[in-house]
Amino acid sequence: ATATRIAVVWIRTYPQCALRPPNRLASITPNRLALNPSARALHPRPCASDCASIAAAEAFYMTGWSTTRGQLQLIYEDACEVVDANKKDDARDDDGDGIADVDQIPTSQLIDRKIRVVAAAVKDPQRLSTALGGLYVGWISVQGVLRVRFARTINLAISCSQFVEYYVCKMLLPLLTPLLAAEFRAWLPVALKTTTKGVFVYFAWKLQEIVSAAQSGMRGGLMFSRGICNYLNKRGYKSFLGLSLEHEKTYLDEALGYGLAIAGFVVQWKWGFGIPFPFNVIMFPLDIFEWYIRWTITNDTAPAM
C-alpha cells in the first residue's frame, strides 16, 4: 500500500518524531487520559493493524537496526569489491588479440572463471559469513514479531474456513468427482479444503489492509506534519497566524496530520488499496516482498489441518 511505503520513508527520515511522545502528555492527568481515550492517540505507536511490510520495517528498526545496518554495510562493501573485480576481469585481454578473453571461452569455463573471480574478490569470507548470519538471525526475530502480530488475522481465516469446508465438500464433491480420473479423486477433498482456506485467508488479509491503511495513514500523516513543524522551527519560524508551530505546544500538527490521513485513506479506498500504473510497475519488487512476508507468516502461523 502507498501509505505503508510513505510511512517507511518517514520512519527513516524522522525517527525522532515517530518515537518521541509529545511533552504535553506529561501535563495531562491520569483522570483526563481515562476520560478522553483520544488523548492516547496523540502519540503514534506500532499496533497490531500494521500491514506486513511496515510491520517488518518497524520490527527491524526496533529490534536492532543499528546492528543490521552495520551488517548490510559489510555486505555492500564486499559486493562492490566483487563488481569491481568482475569489471576488470571482463576487460582482460591476455592474448592481446583485441577481443576480451571472456568472449572467447565456452560457457562452462566462463562460469568457473567468474566463480574464481568472486572468491578472490572477497578478502575476508568469515566477515561476510558472519554478516549474512546476522541478517538471517534478524529476519528470524522479525518473523517472530510478525507471527504474533498477525496471528489473529490468520486464525480468523482458518476458523471461518473450518465452518465452511464441510458444506463446500458436501456440495462440490458429488459434482466434481465424476469429472476426475480415478487416481485423482482421493485428492479432491484436500484440494477443496485448501482452496477454501486460501479464499478465507485472502479476504482476511483484505480486511487487514483496510485497517492497516487507516493506521499507517494516521502514523504517516502525523510524522509528515511534525517533520514540517520541526523543519520550520529550525529555520526560526515558531508561529503561523498566531498558532504555534512547535508540536509540543499546539494541536496544529494533529489537525494537519490526521487531515492528510483521511485524504490518503480515501485515495487508497478509491484505488482499491493498490497503486495505479505506472507506479505499480516500479513498486512491483516491493509487492513481491509484501506477499513473501504474508506467505511466510501465514504458512508458519496457520495450524496444521
Image (tube, rainbow, N blue to C red):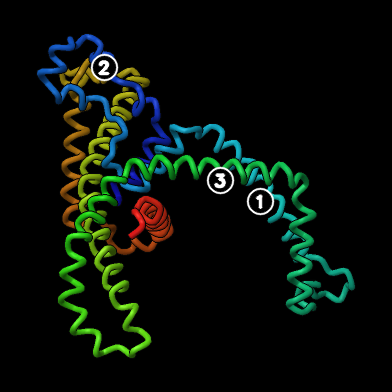
Mark 2 or 3: in front is 3
- Residue 70 rendering spot, x and y as whole percentages: 60, 36
Q: Amino acid at mark 3?
A: Tyr
Q: Which mark is residue 79?
A: 1
Give the quarter of the image for residue 37: top left
Q: Residues within 10 Å of mark 1 (few under 14, many from 20)?
A: some
- Count up the numbered dots: 3
Label located before the other in sequence (2 or 3): 3
Determine the residue positioned at 23% across, 46% down. Answer: 213
When asked about the image quadrant of residue 216, the answer is top left
Per the image, label 2 sits on a secondary structure element best described as loop
Residue linked to disc 2: 248
Q: Residues within 10 Å of mark 3 (few under 14, many from 20)?
A: few
Give me the disc on residue 161.
none
Which mark is first along the chain, 1 or 3? 1
The quadrant of the picture occupied by the C terminus is bottom left
Q: Is residue 243 above or below residue 193?
A: above
Relative placement, left or right, of 120 versus 285 is right
Q: Nearer the viewer, mark 3 or mark 1?
A: 3
- Looking at the picture, tell me which residue is in the foreground, 36 or 220: 36
Position of 30 relative to 204 (above/below): above
Task: Give the residue displayed 59% in from the left and 41% down from the top.
Answer: 134
Q: Which residue is mark 3?
A: 136
Q: Position of residue 185 (x, y in %)?
A: 31, 83
